Amino acid sequence: FALRGTVFTASNAHQLHCIENALVCVDENGVITAVLHQDDTGYSQACQHYQLQGQLTVLEPGQYVLPGFVDLHVHAPQWPQTGKALDLPLNEWLQDNTFPLEARYADIDFARQVYLSLVDTLLANGTTTAMYFATLHDRSSLELARICLEKGQRALVGRVAMDNPDQCPDYYRDESATAAIEATARFIDDVYQLPGNTLRRVRPVITPRFIPSCTDELLTGLGALARRSGCHVQTHCSESDWEHQYVQQRHHKNDTQALNDFGLITRKTVLAHANFLNDEDMDTLKAAGAGVAHCPLSNFYFSNAVFPLRKALERHLHVGLGSDLSGGHSPSMFDSCRHAITASNALHDGVDPAIQAASRGNGSAKIDFRQAFWLATGGGGEALDLPIGQIKTGYAFDALMLDCRATEGNVVIWPELDSSPDILQKIIYNAARSNIIRTWVQGELVFSR
Ligand code: GUN
Ligand code: FE
């Protein structure tokens, strides 16, 4: 099929494409085979061809196609506590609220209810790919993978590993490092073998929760498994002062270096937060091609810090955005974009050298809607090493259609005043779930209103 209308897509943090009257052609495998501009040769013939076949959708003015969002960091089991308990510091929030909630996922029926609700919500919000932490339960973690497959969401799902008796409660802890490593290896096989997962729309992720939750034996074993399996890896890194200092005391180095020593920093690793990266840490991530899930909203609550995003982008690290549900309270990647912009402004020292020297020393830290849009789409795809997040030939057609004509919406487009980039800027700042009228993954319609 083909779609004709205005397309917004970014090919890096600085290159935004606003293509009016684009023709996006998608083959039967859900792969984009062409993105034609209206003055390209063959444009009219191609439009005619798809129209004759009854396979052309023409967008109305005020409707737009964007790449689907990539949410690099979501705790699926925390969905029921979204918007609760955010006044607590990280470790108290984990021990008093989050671990008791996650322990409930021994109950597969409870897990199923929550996961169905979450995946529906994310698809309606335009999140076509999510990288999930599940829990340490084998069956309900696999159930999350199965539900993503059933609903059509592209997903990376981790069965969480956590065995450290000093940091994890008795009721919510892996029996031993060996048991957690074996369970993770089984989970990888089980996800690949799910019926219907032939194209690997759903992938397993090796998921040590974070260094404090894991013994050295577990981290070493999971590093070896990462090397053997070639799977994705996810964990929390340098999130808060408490966590950072814990790792300093235990390993006498930053999280990134410790994780690297355990073999957990690979091209397919996504580190959530990474707020306290120093130059050496950035070099380590750059050398491995590892990615960062910038979680601006939850950083405001738990981190006492702001991720040095602009610096990471200038060093060409792979960075995307994470909602960090429920450490962050919004399932919308539009919100993640807004918070990333706001956080970058908070880190910015301005242009006056005297102010820069006297204050935070971060210099120029601002990003704008273009970088935020890239992070939420192509940046996430790049971090995952998957051909997603761009409306581009050879990429999967993971996309959403926005309708900004809706009178109940907050996006006000004023054609005589707004350029195409202005329109995207207004969308990034003010679009809501109600503006998303269709969501596709791999060319398949997975949500419509
Ligand atoms: N660190 C370890 N576990 C978690 C979690 O569930 N959420 C956040 N934000 N940080 C963590
Ligand atoms: Fe998290």
Image (cartoon, rainbow, N blue to C red):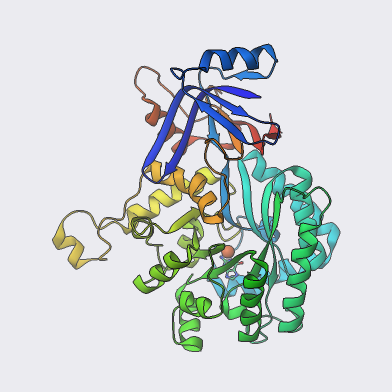
Q: In the picture shown, does residue 85 fall above or below 420? A: below
Q: Quadrant of residue 193?
A: bottom right
List the single residue furthest toward the front: 41
Q: Is residue 285 visible?
A: yes
Of 207 and 306, which appears nearest the observer?
207
Q: Residue 179, position in %: x, y?
A: 77, 80
Of 200 and 86, which appears nearest the observer?
200
Q: Quadrant of residue 438?
A: top right
State which image quarter holds ligand 2: bottom right
Q: Considering the image in quadrants, where does the N terminus appear?
A: top right
Q: Residue shown at 65%/35% (left/top)?
A: 440
Q: Residue 402, position in %: x, y?
A: 56, 29
Q: Residue 134, position in %: x, y?
A: 70, 62
Q: Considering the image in quadrants, where does the C terminus appear?
A: top right
Q: Quadrant of residue 92?
A: bottom right
Of 25 and 401, which appears nearest the observer?
25
Q: Residue shown at 55%/57% (left/top)?
A: 328
Q: Is residue 208 visible?
A: no
Q: Residue shown at 52%/55% (left/top)?
A: 383
Count the labels in the image: 0
Q: Is residue 144 left or right of residue 417?
A: right
Q: Residue shown at 59%/31% (left/top)?
A: 33
